[in-house]
Image (cartoon, rainbow, N blue to C red):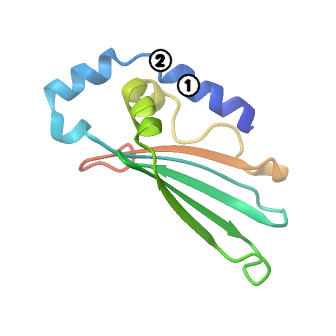
Amino acid sequence: MIRLLLPLAFVLFSQCSSIQASKEQNPTESELVSIQWGKSFGMCRGYCFEEFTFTPDSVYRLRKSWQPELHPQQDSAWKEPAAYALFSAHANFDSLQILGDRLGCPDCADGGSEWLAFRKANRWPYS
């Protein structure tokens, strides 16, 4: 599932002209605040949940386990503006909205789930 969604996300980011046009029309609603990517597995051991949040200047990483007594939650952050700049420059929100809010059966038969979310000023994530 992860191997399918990441290439799909990059293909959808390839068109940025509609994003630029929408920013010019309504800059307060289309301003991108953060990008989140994560994955989760329901039946696993160790760190089964991992999420990255990309902001204009930093990357935040959160890792969780379904057994916190054995694997405590881990948080980390570092300065990395390049990742956010790359994703935000090529995001095509119209193409992503066409997909709907779910593809397939996330985490069915423990195939895991993966998500990609964009937070815009005054909008979360697609409202």
Q: Position of residue 74 (x, y in %)?
A: 63, 69
Q: Say if mark 2 contacts mark 1, CB within 8 Å.
A: yes
Q: Of residues 93 and 83, which is closer to you in this image? A: 83
Q: Amino acid at mark 2?
A: Ser
Residue to which mark 2 is pinned:
14
Is 69 on the left or on the right of 123, as rendered? right
Q: Element type at marker 2?
A: loop
Q: Quadrant of residue 73?
A: bottom right
Pointer 2 local density, CA inside 10 Å: few below 14, some 14–19, many at least 20 = few
Q: Amino acid at mark 1?
A: Phe
Q: CA distance from mark 2 to mark 1?
A: 7 Å
79 lies left or right of 63: left
Q: Position of residue 109 (x, y in %)?
A: 85, 51
41 or 73: nearer the viewer: 73
Q: Residue at x 42, y 39 (%)?
A: 84
- 99 displayed left or right of 30: right
Tally of numbered discs: 2
Quadrant housing the N terminus: top right
Q: Which residue is depicted at the point 71% across and 30% down?
A: 4
Q: Which residue is mark 1?
A: 10
Q: Quadrant of residue 87?
A: top left
In the image, residue 96 above or below residue 76: above
Instruction: Give how far across and how far down residue 68 sits, in percent.
Output: 72, 79
